[in-house]
Amino acid sequence: MIELIIEQRRRDLGSFEVGRVLPFAQRRMVGPYIFFDRMGPKQIAPGLPREADVRPHPHIGLSTITYLFDGEIMHRDSLGSEQAVRPGEVNWMTAGRGITHSERFEKLRAQGGPLDGIQAWVALPDGREEMDPGFWHYANHDLPVFDDDGLTGRLIAGSLVGVTSPVKVDSPQFYVHWQLRAGARVSLPAEYPERAVYVASGDVEINGERVEAGKMAVLVPGKAATIATHSGAVVMALGGEPVGPRYIDWNFVSSSPERLDQARADWAAGRMKLPDLDHEEFIPLPPKLGAKPEPMS
């Protein structure tokens, strides 16, 4: 039932750690999901340095999804958006032909508190990579809720078991947050060709095979999976239809390596507008890696 288990690679950012799951050498994407990072968990003391903020930076060819278990992050972008995201809410930003944004920890800096959440990227499908950029915020009461026999949770995006999230998506996919109490189980159907389960806390058994916190289990296609826990767990399940090979360079995603080069040139030359409400600083373009980019799928 499990094709591959990916263990998150922890990276210390100074004020907190990030656990990188996707992309992974043996599995670059799951459906259209090309990037998956766990922020925290971390108890932040008041006075968080400004260096912890994610200064304005660019994207193309993808949508970003910010979803928190704890804490608050302030989003500002080049469309003029300014929106905090809080636990159970969704900030969904589609870069398309190009957008810039920042993510700042202003409330945590002032008051302290916990920080814990997921940032994921979804590669846009053919014909949509150069679409107009957009930003949408969804409150927690906007999302479909699961509440049945030891299971609670939210359908963050896409469709699953006949339920559809209002979150705007551009290709067939699903992204769900489940909380399982001790002894609970849930079935993940085989309605998508690519699926994965990330264990945020606790541990689970997937058709009898144990998966611990901080690991993502990529599932074999074509079979329903039973996710069970003895002691309780929080899991994120995601996947969908593949969108085809994609290249990635820094914050840029595209089906064309030449388009990545153009995006790098545009950012270096200052041709990408900074966020209206956060334009005093930005992240400089990092050096280009010497190796030719390989397609990811």
Image (spheres, helix red, strand yellow):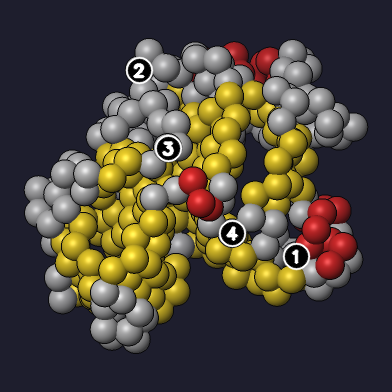
Identify the mark nearer the N-term, 4 or 2: 4
Q: CA distance from mark 1 to mark 3?
A: 34 Å
Q: Name the kind of residue labelled 4 in the image.
A: Pro
Residue that badge 3 annotates:
166
Q: Which mark is residue 87?
A: 4
Q: Quadrant of residue 169?
A: top left
* Residue 25 drawn at (x, y percent): 37, 48
Secondary element under disc 3, as helix, strand or loop, is loop
Q: Residue at x 14, y 49 (%)?
A: 190
Q: CA distance from mark 4 to mark 2?
A: 32 Å
Q: Which mark is residue 29?
A: none
Q: Name the kind of residue labelled 1 in the image.
A: Ser
Q: Is residue 216 visible?
A: no
Q: Nearer the viewer, residue 119 or 233?
A: 233
* Residue 288 drawn at (x, y percent): 62, 30
Q: Which mark is residue 126?
A: 2
Quadrant of the drawing holding the N terminus:
bottom left
Q: CA distance from mark 4 to mark 1?
A: 20 Å
Q: Which mark is residue 15?
A: 1
Identify the mark nearer the N-term, 3 or 4: 4
The reply, left or right, for residue 225 in relation to residue 54 is left
